Amino acid sequence: DLNDPRGFAGQFVGTIQNKLVLYGGTNFPDKPVWDGGIKGWYHDVFVLDAPESEWRKVGKLPETRAVGYGVSISTDDGLLCIGGADATKHLTDVFLLSLDGDKLTTRDLPKLPQPCAYLSGAQIGSVVYVAGGIATPDAVRTMRTFWSLDLKNLDAGWRVLEPWPGNGRMLAV
């Protein structure tokens, strides 16, 4: 168990150097939403070195990275964090989170073509694909977007691909 009485929603989750990593996310720190609680947004990073070990908080990313509800993809170079939301808006940010021992580093990658949270993603070979989501916190329609980024050709940026037939999607698995 992560030693937090509330837990977190919408975290970026993956592996870096065979360690399980949790970053960001949200919860209601003071009281539940149904009692008027205010959502908290986090930028903490936790690491689990092995299944039998305890979770360790290894640090925090900058306050501007207090986010959740994006896509996380484990790569050979670190945890790729794509899009998501903060307390006021949805994001175009894409960055690689890496660990050197317990030292956290980030490297910005090309931004998404438009803000997006609650999207889905996967990697095939060197290409990352993301699909769907919603563009703004008050959106009433899901997006029908499909984008790709070749991690071996970052200068090309995100490519807009032909989406699937039918309606937009969010939180797809």
Image (cartoon, rainbow, N blue to C red):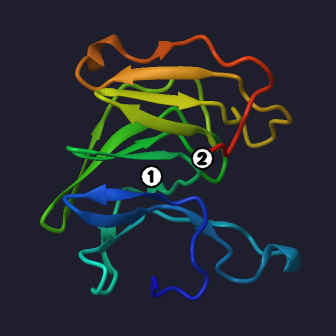
Q: Residue at x 56, y 44 (%)?
A: 84
Residue type beneath disc 1: Arg
Residue 132 higher or lower than 82, as above or below:
above
Mark 2 residue type: Ala
From the top left corner, tell me how far across and down residue 72 is, in percent: 44, 47
For residue 168, above or below residue 98 = above
Q: Separation of disc 2 and disc 1 at Cα? A: 9 Å
- Residue 1 location (% of width, % of height): 46, 85
Q: Mark 1, residues whose alpha carbon is within 10 Å: few (<14), some, or many (≥20)?
A: some
Quadrant of residue 14 within the rendered picture? bottom left
Q: Which residue is mark 2?
A: 85
First along the sequence among labels 2 and 1: 1
Left or right, 116 with respect to 65, comes to right
Among the 4 quarters of the image, the one containing residue 136: top right
- Name the side, left or right, on which 37 lies relative to 63: right
Residue 113 in the image, given as x and y percentages of width and height: 53, 20
Quadrant position of residue 170: top right
Say which element carries label 1: helix
Q: Which mark is residue 65?
A: 1
Q: Is label 2 in a helix, a strand or a loop?
A: loop
The mark total stands at 2
Vertical arrangement, residue 163 with respect to residue 168, above or below: above
Left or right of 139? Residue 95 is: left
For residue 45, side relative to residue 28 (left or right): left
